[in-house]
Image: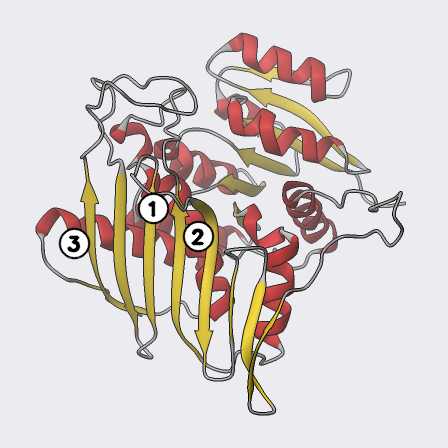
Amino acid sequence: MAKLIRVGIIGCGGIANGKHMPALKKIEDCDMVAFCDIVPERAKEAAQKYGTPDAKVYTDYKELLKDASIDVVHVCTPNRSHSFITVDALEAGKHVMCEKPMAINSAEAKKMLDAAKRTGKKLSIGYQSRFRDDAIYMKQEAEQGTFGEIYYAKATAIRRRAVPTWGVFLNEYEQGGGPLIDIGTHALDLTLYMMDNYKPKYCVGTTYHKLNNDTDQGNMWGNWDPEKFSVEDSAFGFVVMENGATIVLESSWALNMLDPREAVTTICGTKGGADMNDGLRLNGVRNGRQFVMQPSFKAGGVAFNDGAKSESAADREEKAWIEAVRNDTDPVTLPEQAYCVTRILEGIYESAKTGEMFRFQND
C-alpha cells in the first residue's frame, strides 16, 4: 500500500478552496487532517468539507505545526506571511507547498530557500500553469531541442478589466504588489521554465497607476474601491539574462487592450519558436518552407464523443507534489526556480521605483 500522507492547510480562503483542497481531496492515501485560519468559521467549513472525520481546527498556525503526525503543510495565506509561515513549517519538520508568489521580496524568499536546505525538507511553490496541456507539450519540445537556443521570450499576463475586488489583493502591504506579483509571476515562471534559464543580469521596469481611480470601470467582478487600490494596475519589464537572452514581461489587471491573455509565453529560438496565443503553435522552417504546427489536445475521435476532460492543471500539480513527497523525489517546481522569479519581479518593481536599470548580483 502507498504511504499515507497527512496534510495540514494553513489559510482556508479563496485559493485553498478554489485549488488546493479540491485537488488534494482527489488523491488516494492523502488525508487533510488539520485546518487553520484566522477566521475560525472558514477553518471549520474547510474541515467539514475536505477533512477526515477527526480533522482538527486551529486559528494559530504554530499550534497546527506541533502535530508531529502531519507530513505536509500547504501555505495558502496572503503573500506577506508566506515566508515566515513556510520557514516555521520547515523547521517543524514538514514538507511545504506554498502558494505563489514565493514571497513579497527576494530576502524573504531566500529565508525559505535556506530553511529548506537546512532542514532537508521539500519546498515547492504553486505554479500550476506548468501543468497545463500546452505547457507540458511545449516543455517536452524544448527539452528535445526543437527550438534550439531560446534567446527571446515574451511573458504575458494581460487582463483588460479583471481587477480582483475580494480579499487583500488591492493591499500593497499584504500582497507586495498588484498584477505583476499576482499573475505576471505565472507568466514569468512559465517563460523561465521553457528557457531553462535562471540567471538574470539586469532589468528595466515600469509600473502604472493610471486606471485605479476610474469610476466608470466595467470590471469583471464589479467595481473596485479606488481608495483601497494601492497597488499598480499594470506593470512591464525588460529583462536581460547573463547569456544575452531577452525577456519582455507584460502584466495588468486593467488595461485598454483588446487582446487579453493570461499566463502565457512566447519563445523564439535558433531552430524554431512557439506561442500560446491561439492554442499552442509551434513554428519553424522545414525543407525551405515556413511552417506552423498546432497540436490537438482533444482526447476524442468520434463525432459523438470528444473524449473525457483531462485532469486540471491544479489536479496534476497537487498529485505530482504528493508523489514527490511520497517517493522522496524532487518536486516539479524547485524552490531555486521560484526564488529566481521573485528576484526578477523585485528587480522590475525596484527599477520602476528608481527610474534606473536594476542589476542582479548572481552567486
Mark found first going from the N terminus, 2 or 3 = 2
In which quadrant is the N terminus drawn? top right
- Which image quadrant is residue 363 in? bottom left
Which residue in the structure is indicated by mark 2? 187
Type of amino acid under label 3: Ser
Local crowd size for mark 2, using a 10 Å CA cut-off: few (<14), some (14–19), many (≥20): many
Q: Is residue 256 left or right of residue 9?
A: left
Gap between marks 2 and 1 measured at Cα: 9 Å
Q: Is residue 13 left or right of residue 318?
A: left
Question: CB atoms at circles 2 and 1 under 8 Å apart?
Answer: yes
Q: Nearer the viewer, mark 3 or mark 1?
A: 1
Q: Nearer the viewer, mark 2 or mark 3?
A: 2
Front-lying residue, 170 or 13: 170
Q: Note whether residue 344 is visible.
A: yes
For this orientation, the residue located farthest to the left is 355
Gap between marks 3 and 1 measured at Cα: 16 Å
Name the disc covering residue 251, or none: 1
Front-lying residue, 361 or 94: 361
Local crowd size for mark 3, using a 10 Å CA cut-off: few (<14), some (14–19), many (≥20): many
Name the disc covering residue 351, or none: 3
Q: Height in image: 166 above or below 270?
A: above
Mark found first going from the N terminus, 2 or 1 = 2
- Badge 3 element: helix
Q: Height in image: 357 above or below 269?
A: above
